[in-house]
Amino acid sequence: MDVLERESRMVAIATKAVREKIVPIGKSSQYYHSDLLKATTHGGLAIALKSVEPRHLEKVAYDSGIEVAKLVAYRIRENLLEYYELLRKAEVPVSDLYSIEVDISPDGVVLLEVSKDAGEDFRTILQKHSEYAPRHISEVIHAIKGVLSNPSLGIDTNPANFCLTKGDGNGWTDLHFVDLFPPMFLNKDGVYLVGFPQPECRLAEFNKNRYYTDKGALRILRFNLMRINSWFEEEFSNALQNSLDTCHARELIDFFMSLPDQKALTLLRDGKKEDECSLKMERDQFQIDDLREIAFRILPNNPELLDELFKLTMMNFLIPEEERKEKLQTFKRLLISEVCKL
């Protein structure tokens, strides 16, 4: 199914779901695991349509048939709805969810999330308006406190997963978390969900530590803020102290100061390039946060290369382990060549 066909189908399903004429605004854009389409209803209601895992469902339908794809879609739907309710109970400001629709046709299965349009994503706002960082970074940390203290609930804290709406003045308001996929919670079978399909045990445990712990979730937020602007590292530390109790904030700051990227900074200052290279080569595919943070310390002002390196370390569950290892070696080679240029 091409982009235009998917857009038309999304609009048709959403129109039936909210029972008002829906007009798409702009084109679909890649939104992590989803296609995102902004739209408005005849009554002026601004909505966001996300086609959840369209390519995976197409593959399941092609490989195993429509009936299997339908079962998969309904299972994902059930998990999305449960995750939404768990986030609300944890007092995370999630965007209003109107409906999650499963549409079945001879051509395939579509899973569509219909929610209130929550505005512009936080990452884009920070890229354009760094002056809003102090206020809104604290706001994000405060918004996820209920998840940070709940070991049965996970969250992906990438700033792109939060949205704000334009205020009456020049600022932004109404922070909302908008990324329900993949659902991350301890299910009734005792499984910590971290992706779909659920990855093999070691990879699942790795992702559990990243998304279900306060240190893991905040580490993701910290790194992605630094990628936008290196100055945001200081703002992040200030926000921890403003949003959390003193002991917890101090514990987290000490944790971040103990990470390998701090050692990398020292080695770089001392001109110990060989030790710097050894620090990277010691890391395996389950230490991608170490590697990404070290890369940032080496290339703080080269966002294009950082993006390339970031993609090489993405933990795509559907890629065979050998391919992931090969990408990791490419990452290390590129990074070592940059160290040699310093």
Image (spheres, helix red, strand yellow):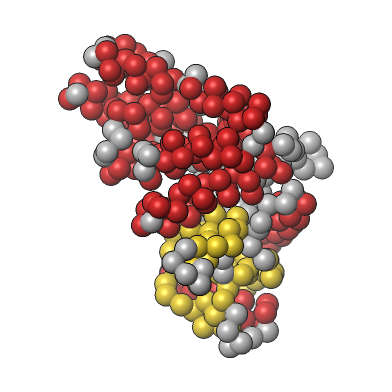
Quarter of the image where one finds residue 250: top right
Q: Nearer the viewer, residue 141 or 19?
A: 141
Mark yes or no: residue 236 visible. Answer: yes
Q: Position of residue 315 (x, y in %)?
A: 49, 37
Kindly identify the residue that appears in the image at 45 percent across and 53 percent down: 132
Quarter of the image where one finds residue 68: bottom right
Q: Position of residue 338 (x, y in %)?
A: 23, 27
Q: Position of residue 72 (x, y in %)?
A: 67, 55
**Left or right, residue 141 beside residue 334:** right
Kindly identify the residue that appears in the image at 56 percent across and 69 percent down: 117
Extreme residue in the left direction:
341
337 shown above or below 222: above
Number of marks in the rendered image: 0
Q: Nearer the viewer, residue 94 or 251?
A: 251
277 shown above or below 14: above
Kindly identify the residue that appears in the image at 28 percent across and 44 percent down: 304
Mark yes or no: residue 21 visible. Answer: no
Q: Nearer the viewer, residue 21 or 160?
A: 160
Q: Position of residue 298 (x, y in %)?
A: 30, 28
44 shown above or below 319: below
Extreme residue in the right direction:
188
Quadrant that contains the C terminus: top left
Kindly identify the residue that appears in the image at 26 percent across and 39 percent down: 302
